[in-house]
Image: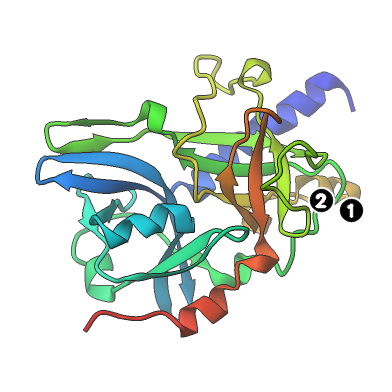
Amino acid sequence: MSIEEWNEICAQVSVQMIEHVKSYITPISRVISDGEGEHLGTGSYFELDGERYLITNEHVAKHLKTNSLTHKFWNNENIFKLTNPAISLSHPVDVAISKIDDNNWGVLDHEALAIPFERFSKSHNTVEHELLFFAGYSGERSNFYFGFMNTPGTPYLTQELPFPTTVPEADPKYHFALHYSPDKATSVDGTSSLPDPHGFSGSLVWDTKVMACIKENKEWSPELAEVTGIVWGWPSVAACILVTKVEHLNLATLKTNLPINA
């Protein structure tokens, strides 16, 4: 495969994955006052046993203890407060979920979707050189004006990096690393660049299955992609994004322990 052919594959996968996941994701903001907010991180909606949940990092959701947190449904400009508490696992897992009640999900028209639980991989077990994808909301690109939070999303297609040995808070039992070098990234549309990654916390990472399909001579589509982890950190010393492996998220167990507001 030539470099040109590889670049074309990456460009096509990026475009298709952006379209595929955009309805699953949401920016998460902290309410400061009735007319002011602050972007905190990224979340995604998933569905388990017929109920919908928001998933993000524990270090994002913990702000619920002192402030209201908000989320947005795709293709709807309204901001909604999280109405249920979150249950979480702290570092090294760093994950939290909160139930989205049916009446909140259906109160206004939108195009948000919830990821079927079956699309969470049983474990992080990708083929060699697999393409991995996430889309998140950078704080650098988020602005609050006229009572609205404007948070353009940032999609990113990359590959796994050899595990860094210079990051004491990273543990290869729980985590894996992704390349994140803005100076080396290529824009699909030729006009954008990678932002500071603050705000990507809570973004789900997808195993696209592109390389797996190439190896097996199968046709690829984004519907084959599976969630393989959740972003939680970005140590500048290692020029990478740190991700918790999917097998440590324990979503089904968290669900059974989740308190629900009366």
Q: Residue at x 49, y 46 (%)?
A: 201
Q: Quadrant of residue 51?
A: bottom left
Q: Count all numbered tags in the image, as a single digit.
A: 2
For the residues labelled 2 and 1, the Cα–Cα distance comes to 5 Å
Q: Quadrant of residue 120?
A: bottom right
Tell me if 110 is positioned left or right of 220 in this view.
left
**Residue 136, disc:** none
In this view, 156 is above or below 28 = above
Can you give x and y, in whole percent of width and height, for residue 108 in the image?
19, 60
- The reply to whether discs 2 and 1 touch (Cβ–Cβ < 8 Å) is yes
| Amino acid bearing label 2 | Cys
In this view, 152 is above or below 163 = above
Q: Residue at x 59, y 21 (%)?
A: 187
Can you give x and y, in whole percent of width and height, for residue 195 in the image?
50, 25
Q: Which residue is mark 2?
A: 213
Q: Quadrant of the N terminus?
A: top right
Can you give x and y, in whole percent of width and height, for residue 125 in the image?
80, 59
The answer to whether any part of residue 24 appears in the image is no
